[in-house]
Image: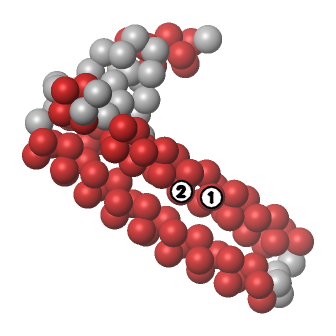
C-alpha cells in the first residue's frame, strides 16, 4: 500500500510535519548520544556517576531506536495507525506524542494490563 492510501486520515502536510518533527528529534538524540559516548570514553567518573552515564546511554539508544522505527513506519505507510486496532491516531495526539503506537482506547487497555 502507498503511504497516503494507508494513512489517509492524515494529510500529506500533516505527515510531512510529523516526519520533520521525528527527524529533528532523531538528530538531537543522536547528537546527545555522541556527547554521552565521548563522556564515557573519558571514564573519569565515580561509580554513581558512571552508573548514571550508562543509564543515560541506554535511554538515548532506546529513544533513537524508537524514533528510527517511527520513521520506518512512516515510510511504510503504517505510521499513525493503532498497533492494536489499526484505527487512525489523530494528528493532535501524534503532534504531542509522535511515538504513540496506540489510539487512546487501546493505550488505556494496554496500560491497565
Q: Residue furthest front?
A: 1
Q: What residue lies at 43% left-to-right and 61% top-to-bottom?
A: 26
Instruction: Give the x, y percent position of residue 31.
Output: 50, 75
Quarter the N terminus occupies: top left
Instruction: Give the x, y percent position of residue 3.
Output: 25, 35
Answer left or right for 112 relative to 47: left
Q: Disc 2 marks which residue?
A: 64
Q: What residue lies at 50% left-to-right and 10% top-to-bottom?
A: 109
Foreground residue among 95 and 82 = 82
The residues bearing labels 2 and 1 have C-alpha atoms spaced at a distance of: 5 Å
Instruction: Give the x, y percent position of residue 43.
Output: 82, 84
Above or below for 25 versus 10: below
**The quarter of the displayed image where residue 60 is located:** bottom right
Q: Disc 1 marks which residue?
A: 61
Instruction: Give the x, y percent position of residue 90.
Output: 22, 27
Q: What residue lies at 67% left-to-right and 62% top-to-bottom?
A: 56
**The quarter of the displayed image where residue 100 is located:** top left
**The quarter of the displayed image where residue 99 is located:** top left
Above or below for 53 versus 71: below
Asked whether the beta carbons under mark 2 and mark 1 sit within 8 Å of each other, the answer is yes
Label count reads 2
Amino acid at each position: 500500500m502507498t503511504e497516503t492510501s494507508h494513512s489517509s486520515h492524515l494529510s500529506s502536510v500533516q505527515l510531512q510535519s510529523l516526519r520533520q518533527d521525528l527527524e529533528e528529534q532523531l538528530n538531537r538524540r543522536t547528537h546527545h548520544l555522541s556527547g554521552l559516548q565521548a563522556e564515557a570514553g573519558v571514564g573519569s567518573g565515580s561509580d554513581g556517576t558512571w552508573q548514571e552515564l550508562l543509564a543515560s546511554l541506554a535511554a538515548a539508544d532506546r529513544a533513537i531506536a524508537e524514533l528510527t522505527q517511527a520513521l520506518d513506519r512512516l515510510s511504510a505507510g503504517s505510521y499513525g495507525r493503532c498497533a492494536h486496532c489499526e484505527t487512525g491516531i489523530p494528528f493532535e495526539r501524534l503532534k504531542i506524542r509522535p511515538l504513540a503506537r496506540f489510539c487512546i482506547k487501546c493505550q488505556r487497555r494496554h496500560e491497565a494490563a
